[in-house]
Image: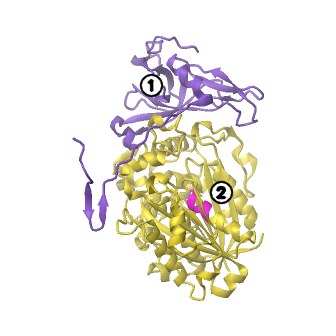
């Protein structure tokens, strides 16, 4: 394997609906933005592309990635579509990494999109729930918010996690997004407002859950040779990892915790793992990515994290999977203030505010979750953070993590069925 | 009356209503005995013939060791492993809201089973609550032919020890 660099990225504004543009034009916007950002780069340097979108039901157009490929003028170069539920974007990013790392390509474009506005929200929820077992799970009341609610009920039971701690995640991510013009749903919230918003699936309220979105994102990955030639501040991808778990939550067996380098078996002597309260696939993804990047103490060696917060609860669960804190300590982790941005007023008492910002962009909760674009959006935000160009791209530098050296992006599917973790580093 | 012609929702940009539906010929294949079992008031999990791992939601090969499993009758009583009450849902289930989902744990089974919980008093829902399986009188050959109700002996709904179709619990 050879080193792989990210040399550019672009995103469309995520919105409830973009009726004036189809998916091809959304991707084209993000693609043109990415190409403009590296003036010495030319599309003749692109060897191929990987496209990602989640649902053929939303798109109602099979082979939609082929239509993007021709729209971008990339035919007859190699192309394929990646699909892996909510982790589609993260898997697409890693697929482009593989193309360059293997030497098959010197430059590979990863593009992703989703157009979820074509059906009403509840039909959309039904489409998403089709990504649960359609014999045993979907007919019972197929609803992802219900599945995640059951997981966090168990997390609360095992570890004492509270709904107020979950609400703090919502306050954080929606407030961060106030400084991110690409975000769909920026707002200032209080814990009380999160708890008083309509109950969706106990204990998750509307403000604990991300929204449907239309949007696209593009990442350009390249070999060292291409990166040096065209990019002043390339970002190196130093670790990739992914993991999986059983499709049915009911099938998650109980065993031992997969340990990270800084953990010991005795830390978890009495924990039945992963149960339905933790994501074994996320832990596996983190372990593999840390191993490749040489990370031994993630809580100390990362500058920021962009993780898949489809639910406030899953952000807390993911702190633990990624080893930012121990299993069971996710609620206390958010309460400490560690994952908040420094210098932003959240209206909360946060003793350790800003030590390791998580979802400085606003995450899925506030940016929106156009599934096929989401994992690539995280990569673009991480890329800008590590370049130190947040101010240039967002129009203000409130969300710029100072001296950002190393970032983690995390993409997550189903009830934890596919999960990717990638590590990016400033040069 | 069905509208004739194309329904135009907007002209700039042009947005039309576009209907789509499809009927499938859906085989439960190797899982068929589970669904037939529900129509007879039986809850079938599966047990690995090699390592004895026991699945409360059946599968015909073991996820742990890969050996074939055999059908294994589950007790009709279990406990709530976790729960939620859904006030919204996918479009297909919106009219049924609010409904309560539970994962059920059974003695002697290593994995869980997703089902609905009915007949629970507000505030009576908790992890560990004993529950009993009930079966539809007229099967629809879907997993919803079984659901659970609280089995607390002091709970008014559980004085009846028979499943609603007249089959006695086999625990």
Instruction: State the image coordinates of residue A98 (x, y, percent, origin top left).
Output: 70, 66
Residue drawn at the location 57% of the way across and 13% of the way down = B170
**Chain letter of the residue carrying label 2:** A
Location of mark 2 (residue)? A323
Location of mark 1 (residue)? B140
Q: Is residue A36 magenta?
A: no
The letter of the purple chain is B
Decide which of A358, A215 is in the foreground and name it.
Answer: A215
Screen quadrant of the C terminus of chain A = bottom right
Q: Please say if A234 is above or below A409.
A: below
Q: Secondary structure at mark 2?
A: loop
Instruction: State the image coordinates of residue A207 (x, y, percent, origin top left).
Output: 39, 54
Question: How many C-alpha atoms fall within 10 Å of the one at disc 2: few (<14), some, or many (≥20)?
Answer: many
Q: Is residue A88 magenta?
A: yes
| Magenta stretch bounds | A87-92
The letter of the yellow chain is A
**Chain letter of the residue carrying label 1:** B
Q: Is residue A304 left or right of residue A183?
A: right
Residue drawn at the location 42% of the way across and 73% of the way down = A179
Decide which of A84, B98 is in the foreground and name it.
Answer: A84
């Amino acid at each position: 394997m050879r080193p792989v660099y990210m040399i550019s990225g672009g995103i469309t504004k995520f919105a409830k609906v973009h009726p004036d543009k189809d998916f091809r034009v959304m991707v084209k916007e993000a693609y043109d933005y990415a190409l403009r950002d590296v003036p010495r780069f030319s599309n003749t340097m692109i060897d191929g592309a990987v496209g990602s979108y989640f649902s053929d039901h939303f798109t109602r157009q099979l082979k939609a990635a082929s239509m993007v490929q021709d729209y971008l003028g990339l035919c007859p170069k190699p192309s394929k579509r990646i699909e892996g539920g909510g982790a589609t974007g993260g898997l697409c990013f890693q697929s482009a990494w593989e193309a360059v790392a293997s030497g098959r390509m010197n430059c590979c474009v990863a593009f992703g999109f989703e157009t979820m506005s074509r059906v009403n929200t509840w039909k959309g929820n039904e489409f998403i729930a089709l990504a649960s077992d359609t014999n045993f799970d979907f007919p019972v009341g197929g609803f992802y918010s219900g599945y995640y609610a059951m997981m966090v009920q168990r997390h609360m039971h095992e570890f004492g996690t509270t709904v107020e701690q979950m609400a703090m995640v919502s306050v954080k991510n929606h407030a961060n997004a106030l400084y991110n013009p690409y975000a769909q749903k920026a707002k200032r919230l209080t814990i009380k407002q999160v708890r008083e918003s309509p109950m969706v699936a106990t204990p998750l309220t509307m403000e604990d859950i991300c929204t449907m979105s239309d949007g696209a994102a593009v990442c350009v990955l390249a070999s060292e040779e291409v990166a040096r030639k065209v990019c002043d501040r390339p970002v190196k991808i130093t670790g990739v990892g992914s993991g999986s778990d059983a499709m049915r939550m009911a099938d998650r067996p109980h065993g031992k915790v997969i340990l990270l380098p800084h953990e010991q078996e005795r830390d978890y002597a009495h924990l039945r793992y992963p149960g339905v309260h933790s994501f074994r696939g996320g832990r596996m993804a983190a372990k593999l990515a840390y191993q490749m990047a040489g990370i031994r103490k993630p809580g100390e060696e990362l500058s920021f994290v962009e993780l898949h917060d489809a639910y406030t609860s899953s952000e807390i669960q993911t702190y633990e999977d990624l080893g930012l804190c121990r299993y069971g300590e996710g609620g206390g982790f958010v309460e400490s203030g560690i994952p908040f941005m420094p210098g932003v007023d959240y209206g909360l008492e946060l003793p350790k505010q800003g030590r390791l910002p998580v979802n400085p962009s606003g995450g899925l909760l506030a940016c929106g979750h156009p599934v096929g674009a989401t994992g690539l959006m995280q990569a673009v935000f991480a890329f800008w953070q590590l370049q130190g160009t947040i101010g240039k791209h967002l129009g203000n530098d409130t969300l710029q993590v100072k001296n950002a050296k190393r970032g983690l992006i995390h993409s997550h599917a189903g009830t934890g069925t596919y999960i990717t973790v990638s590590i990016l580093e400033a040069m | 009356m069905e509208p004739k012609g194309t329904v135009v929702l907007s002209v700039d940009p042009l947005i039309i209503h576009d209907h789509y539906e499809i009927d499938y010929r859906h085989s439960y294949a190797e899982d068929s005995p589970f669904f037939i079992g529900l129509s007879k008031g039986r809850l079938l999990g599966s047990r690995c013939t090699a390592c004895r791992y026991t699945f409360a939601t059946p599968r015909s090969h073991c996820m742990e060791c890969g050996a074939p499993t055999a059908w294994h009758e589950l007790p009709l009583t279990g406990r709530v492993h976790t729960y939620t009450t859904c006030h919204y849902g996918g479009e297909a289930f919106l009219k049924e809201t609010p409904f309560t989902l539970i994962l059920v744990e059974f003695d002697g089974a290593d994995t869980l089973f997703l089902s609905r919980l009915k007949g629970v008093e507000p505030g009576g829902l908790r992890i560990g609550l004993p529950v009993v399986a009930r079966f539809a009188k007229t099967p629809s050959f879907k997993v919803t032919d079984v659901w659970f109700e609280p089995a607390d002996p002091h709970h008014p709904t559980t004085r009846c020890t028979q499943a609603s179709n007249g089959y006695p619990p086999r625990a």
